[in-house]
């Protein structure tokens, strides 16, 4: 092997290390440019978060509610842009890392083979005596050591690059999932604003009427669960027996046809899905639209028959619901204590378990009398309530 070939390979090694450092530097420069965009978006996001907090302290008017929707939509749009910038920045780094990894892996593999052939590291005497003179042997051995040091450095950088690459790939997947969720939220916010405008016809009076009706319903239901309704005992009923019928159309404290179904245990409401059986035919209309992916979870896992005949039209779930998070309903209450359901097949309401039937009503601030029926279940401390019904 000639004297020139060993230094040449050494220079190739140094060149590869230098090239890798250049790629790192380019990443830093690019990151600084795109980081400025991300930082600007962060400032705008903070501004809109402060604006929303300020709007929430102001009078509860239709104008204010629409302004909140607009601010929330703008805020979510900014968050989407920020996430997209992060994904773009990360994607550029990942692409460059992938190219660098391929180059380094190929170079390192090639260099290991050449170094082995040159040196036969496990047979150093053979390597030395194969050279024409002592001066060449010393020089060659010196360069060989430098090459081996460069190889080790390349290997360390390669391993680090692989670790960074995998970490950033995971981060990219997490950002992509976050982006999809932000887009879903944006769709919900736009739908909620459109629903409000449809319900109110951009009329302040109609908006205040909606709030008053919802407030009266909430107060009445809370009073009924607390035992403040006027009730009369009807007698024993069996599971599946007809006990009432759903009122069709708007009624006292209700804007439309539905059964508000509640399970209570010693005065504390329970999630009805823990008792109602699964495998039922249903349509989920609890989100921005029927069949949308942003609705409340429909996850019954009990053994009871349903109080109405399927197909079930599910319009609001138990707990912190889509309506609470995205519509004016959240101005009235923060927790939905039952589920809202309806059936296109029949208005008939049935007892979900055998027990004692009570018919009741409650007159609250809404100026009307809210009817309901209650079943005190046999052999348990559970009661089921059925509201927005006739008996």
Image (tube, grey):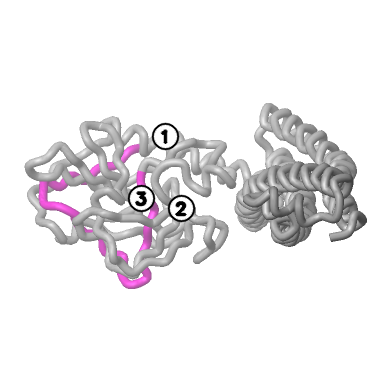
Q: Secondary structure at mark 1?
A: helix
Gap in Å between the C-alphas at discs 2 and 1? Answer: 23 Å
Residue 171 vertical placement versus 57 (above, below): below
Residue 192 visible in the current orientation: no
Q: Residue at x 25, y 39 (%)?
A: 264
Q: Secondary structure at mark 2?
A: loop
Per the rendering, the mark at residue 260 is 3
Using the image as rendered, state which of residue 337 and residue 360 is in the foreground.
Answer: 337
Quarter occupied by the N terminus? bottom right
Question: In front of the other: label 3 or label 1?
Answer: 3
Closer to viewer: mark 2 or mark 1: 2
Does label 2 or label 1 sit earlier along the sequence?
1
| Label 3 environment density (alpha carbons within 10 Å; few <14, some 14–19, many ≥20) | many
Q: Quickly name the residue at label 2.
A: 296
Determine contact: label 2, label 1, CB under 8 Å.
no
- What residue span does the magenta drawing correspond to? 338-362
Q: CA distance from mark 3 to mark 2?
A: 15 Å
Residue 86 in percent (x, y) is at 75, 47
Q: Which residue is mark 1?
A: 219
Of the 4 image quadrants, the one containing the C terminus is bottom left
């Amino acid at each position: 092997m000639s004297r020139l070939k060993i230094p040449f390979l050494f220079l190739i090694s140094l060149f590869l290390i230098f090239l890798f450092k250049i790629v790192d530097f380019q990443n830093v420069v690019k990151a600084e440019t795109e980081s400025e965009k991300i930082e600007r978006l962060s400032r705008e996001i903070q501004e809109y978060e402060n604006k929303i907090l300020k709007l929430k302290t102001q009078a509860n008017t239709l104008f204010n509610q629409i302004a909140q929707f607009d601010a929330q939509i703008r805020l979510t749009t900014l968050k989407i842009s920020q996430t997209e910038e992060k994904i773009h920045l990360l994607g550029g780094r990942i692409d460059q890392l992938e190219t660098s990894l391929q180059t380094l892996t190929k170079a390192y593999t090639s260099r290991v083979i050449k170094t082995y052939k040159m040196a036969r590291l496990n047979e150093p005497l053979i390597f030395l005596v194969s050279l024409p003179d002592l001066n060449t042997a010393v020089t060659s051995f010196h360069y060989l050591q430098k090459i081996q040091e460069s190889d080790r450095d390349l290997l360390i950088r390669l391993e680090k690059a692989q670790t960074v690459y995998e970490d950033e790939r995971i981060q990219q997947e997490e950002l992509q999932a976050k982006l999809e969720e932000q887009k879903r939220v944006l769709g919900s916010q736009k739908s909620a604003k459109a629903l409000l405008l449809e319900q109110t016809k951009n009329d302040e009076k109609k908006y205040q009427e909606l709030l008053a009706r919802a407030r009266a319903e909430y107060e009445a239901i809370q009073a009924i669960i607390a035992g403040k309704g006027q009730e009369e005992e009807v007698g024993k009923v069996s599971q599946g027996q007809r006990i009432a019928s759903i009122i069709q159309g708007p009624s006292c404290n209700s804007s439309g046809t539905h059964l508000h179904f509640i399970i209570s245990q010693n005065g504390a409401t329970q999630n009805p899905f823990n008792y109602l059986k699964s495998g039922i035919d249903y349509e989920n209309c609890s989100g921005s639209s029927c069949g949308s992916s942003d609705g409340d979870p429909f996850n019954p896992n009990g053994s009871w028959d349903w109080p109405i005949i399927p197909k079930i039209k599910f319009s609001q779930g138990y707990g912190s619901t889509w309506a609470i998070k995205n519509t004016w309903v959240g101005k009235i209450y923060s927790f939905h204590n039952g589920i809202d359901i309806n059936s296109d097949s029949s208005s008939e309401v049935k007892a979900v378990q055998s027990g004692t039937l009570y018919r009741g009503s409650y007159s609250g601030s809404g100026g009307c009398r809210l009817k309901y029926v209650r079943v005190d279940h046999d052999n348990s401390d559970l009661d089921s309530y059925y509201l927005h019904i006739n008996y």
